[in-house]
Amino acid sequence: KEALPAPAVICMHGTFSRTEGKYAVLDPEITQNPELRHGIENRLYAIDLSKRGYVTIATDVYAFGETLHGRTNPEAVADFHEKYPDWSLDGRRILDHQRALDVLGKLGLVKDGAFGAIGDSLGGRGVMFLTAFDERIKAAVSSTGISPNCSNVYRHCRTHSYQMPKLKRTLLADGRMPWDYHEMVALCAPRALLALEPFNDAYNPDVWPTFQSVYWA
């Protein structure tokens, strides 16, 4: 308590935690469950950062973790797209994460203007979007969060299209990608951004466009 107010970090979980959601970065007991352990150990960064003196917050990334009204996540997503066909899940997630920052800002725990973000995989993607569109984030760490559109066209036309249905419709209409990740990275400047990207990501088999996204920005 003596160290408050302190810098705050919003911690976003990865794709692997479909049912665990926020607890994948909050709950040490999850790493003891052999059925859930793969991909989760060593990712309790919400706890690790709090031990270092940061205020941390972790939410369920929309379409993962706990739901309301007894619905499954696929049911909630289908209802969302029916009500808001021009919205993307990324847009909804930005809104959720911004509301989390709003809550933190009203608790008197956070040093003025000292917000950061960290996430892996799905969480890394969320970090990129939030940092690009909310200047309250002053420092960000995105792990496997840059997934260039032009080198992943197949994902937007098929399995990945639920994330951004409007982008899919635009792409199928004229074959042109309206934006790519180097533009998003540029929106994060001049704030601090650490982008960690692997050489062996099955979802981004061509790593060069990922490196170009950072270089071109």
Image: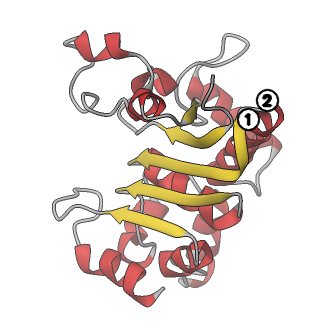
Residue 86: which quarter of the image? bottom right
Residue 130: which quarter of the image? bottom right
Q: In the image, what residue occupies the spot 50% across and 40% down?
A: 12
**Residue at the outermost left position:** 200
Name the spot of residue 133 as percent of width and height, x first.
Answer: 69, 64
Name the spot of residue 35 as percent of width and height, x first.
Answer: 23, 14
Q: CA distance from mark 1 to mark 2?
A: 5 Å
Q: In the image, what residue occupies the spot 40% across and 64% down?
A: 194
- Between 84 and 112, the one nearer to me in the picture: 112
Q: Which residue is mark 2?
A: 107
Instruction: Say if mark 1 contacts mark 2, CB within 8 Å.
Output: yes
Mark 1 burial class by Cα count in 10 Å: few <14, some 14-19, many 20+: some
Q: Amino acid at mark 2?
A: Leu
Mark 2 burial class by Cα count in 10 Å: few <14, some 14-19, many 20+: few
Q: Which residue is mark 1?
A: 104
Lateral position of residue 67 relative to residue 202, left or right? right
Residue 42: which quarter of the image? top left
Label 2: which secondary element: loop
On screen, residue 105 above or below 66: below
Specify how the rendered protein is coloured.
secondary structure
On screen, residue 73 above or below 126: above
Label 1: which secondary element: helix
**Residue 160 showing in the rendered view:** no
Q: In the image, what residue occupies the spot 39% across and 35% down?
A: 45
- Quarter in which the N terminus is drawn: top right
Lateral position of residue 64 relative to residue 195, left or right? right
Name the spot of residue 91 as percent of width and height, x first.
Answer: 69, 53
Q: Amino acid at mark 1?
A: Leu
